[in-house]
Image (tube, grey):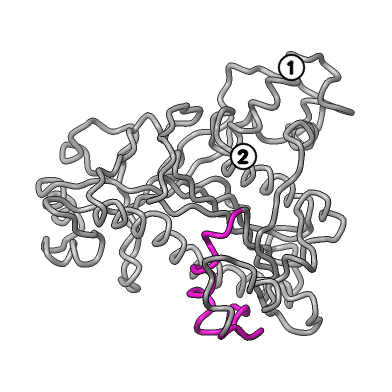
Amino acid sequence: MWKYRERLSYYEKLRRSLYEVLRDALERRLMKVSLIDSFYNYVREGVEYSFLDKSELKPQSKKMEKESALFNTFIVIFCEGVISPQLKNYIRFFPENAVIKKNLEYLANFSLYKRFNLNLRYFENPGFLDFIEQLLNVDYALLIQQDPTIKKRNRYSLTHFHVKIDWPIADAAEDLAKYLRYVRDNLYEHGDKVARTLQNKLFEYYGCHHSVGGRRTAGLIAAQLLRRLDCISTVFVSSCESRSMYKYSERGVSKFFLIQLNDEQITALAEREGMNVDSFKSRYLYPAEDYYVGVTEATYRHTIHSKPPEDGRLRKLKPAYSWLRLRDEFLHPKVTALNCRPISYKWIYSPSDQTQRLV
């Protein structure tokens, strides 16, 4: 309950508001780097970009694309407060990977360290998002959190890079299973088969198949671990295998991905939104050679089987029941269209011809 805004003090509400504004700015930049910049990497190199099938956006989808250096991948953790030192055994941030000039100079492809100063790592600095972007290709995760050295001011800082997520999957699954009241004491109390199923369900809870690669596994493990804090947090994961950017937050699970639109679909959407075609393209779409692409977000909700029971009693696991359902889909405006809102675009469960069902 302490994470809900209604339960916060006045000053905590101010911090929450600041966090949400900064998170929106970070999300927009990461969405561009993950999807738009990656797409144009493929275009520039003359390599065909593999757009997602609708089946890949459905919960429990197993399909994966092969890795490619053209797709920008990363994990970014943004914490509303300060991550407790007790979690350092699992989210590994130490002085040797703190964002200071001495540590940055060891990065092979990071030239900015010569012009680096400590102010650059603070969110309010105009160059902060550019700084973040230059560090995204460093392996493992980036950690943004409230500056622990300032007690009386809400100031967010990129405090650590090369942050490893090192929490066993079994421990994360046990933590979730206890929260959902499928086990009381430990993961294996109902036998090995149930324990394996609960580990698979952990992945489903975060919108992944249990066979996914290391980056998405690390991201969802981090999201589960950060639930232990008395503040909210957000984990962004850009994955080449899925050609998507995942967002895990207090609002649930989201996936950002590219869709391909032809002239007929664009005309139908523009008419529905009361715009002319050129205005719609300039506000929502990015051009390719003979088509346009747009950024879509699919949001998911947890079902009754993946929420704590109201009576708080232990319950029996029923593997056949889904833990995640599609909630909504949006077509996002371009990152430069600051006055435009996301628009509804039902695609995942719609007929192949989108122009027949624009709702």
Q: Closer to us: mark 2 or mark 1?
A: 2
Cα distance in 3D space between marks 2 and 1: 20 Å
Which stretch is magenta? 115-139
- The spot of residue 153 in percent (x, y) is 74, 84
Between discs 2 and 1, the one toward the N terminus? 1
Residue 6 left/right relative to 73: right
Residue type, numbered disc 1: Val
> For the point 63% across and 86% down, which residue is it?
117
Residue type, numbered disc 2: Thr
Instruction: Residue 340: name its quadrant.
Output: bottom left
**126 lies above or below 249:** below
**165 lies above or below 182:** below
Q: Which residue is mark 2?
A: 217
Tell me, yes or no, whether the two marked residues, 2 and 1, touch with CB atoms within 8 Å: no
Instruction: Residue 121: name its quadrant.
Output: bottom right
> For the point 66% across and 75% down, which residue is it?
156
Local SS, label 1: helix
Residue 127 left/right relative to 55: right
Residue farthest along the right direction in this orientation: 185
Pick the front one: 272 or 210: 210
In the rendered image, the quadrant that contains the C terminus is top left
Q: Which residue is mark 1?
A: 194
